[in-house]
Amino acid sequence: MHADFEMVMVGRLLLASLLGALIGLEREIHGRTAGFRTHLLVSLGSALFVIVSINFYLTFGNTSGTGVLGVDPGRIAAQVVTGIGFLGAGAIIRDKTSVRGLTTAACLWVAAAIGVACGSGLYLLSIAVTGIAILSLIALKKIEARLARDSYAMLTVESDRVEGQLEIIIRELESRNFKLIPAGMERRVDGSFMYEFQVKMYNKVIATDEIEQIALLPGVRGVKFWRQASV
């Protein structure tokens, strides 16, 4: 009976590894740090924690139906939810006003949940969740690309000290239907200023013409523009 139990558990571990790997494969293709192997191991480890919980219950718990249970079979599995939060937080990167890694962190969270489900013997549910996750990562990304939506970028302008320069830059771009949000300002030792903006582009892109207009403003030494990375 014990050997049969272990064989069933090995099957659960293999399924958890496969399903976690499928989600990780999509992240790997998109060049994310937490990819194929990471998601496989997260799902595998989560399944093993649940299996260990089940084994503790069968070995030390009171299954006679009388008296106190003695062992909580869900206690170890519950810690997976807490533990995966630390791993997910490590996948999130904040770069100034841009945040990357949210989707990868969510994938790790789902992979852990799939591992828990596999370890509990919920095979069909695990496969269904994996299919939904992969569909959302691949198909919905294509749909998102077709949607008209606002986008954001960062704009840095290096300038000599000019009275009202900040307002001049904002007015110049807002006249072209861009929304500028001041994100920072630095005064350098040579007396020049560095202005940093977050640009809301209302489904537009800043073209060379806009960059040229800013560069031609009195006192401007240089302009840098870059799109914020996606999650």
Image (cartoon, rainbow, N blue to C red):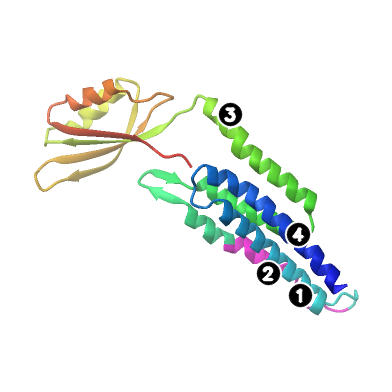
Residue type at numbered disc 3:
Ile
Q: Earlier in the sequence, mark 3 or mark 2?
A: 2
Residue type at numbered disc 4:
Arg
Say if mark 2 contacts mark 1, CB within 8 Å: yes
Nearer to the camera, 224 or 69 = 224
Q: Mark 3 points at which residue?
A: 143
Q: Earlier in the sequence, mark 4 or mark 1?
A: 4
Residue at (55% x, 59% y) in the render: 85
Q: Earlier in the sequence, mark 2 or mark 1?
A: 1
Query: Is label 2 in a helix, a strand or a loop?
Result: helix
Q: How far apart are marks 4 and 1 (CA)?
A: 17 Å
Give the residue at the far left of this rendering. Answer: 190
Q: In which quarter of the image is residue 53?
A: bottom right
Q: How far apart are marks 2 and 1 (CA)?
A: 10 Å
Residue 12 marker: 4
Magenta stretch in the rendered image: 67-83
Query: In the rendered image of this protein, does residue 44 appear above or below residue 192?
Result: below
Q: Earlier in the sequence, mark 4 or mark 2?
A: 4
Q: Distance between the residues labelled 3 and 2?
A: 39 Å
Q: Mark 2 points at which residue?
A: 76
Residue 56 marker: 1
Residue type at numbered disc 1:
Phe
Q: Which of marks 1 and 3 is nearer the N terminus?
A: 1
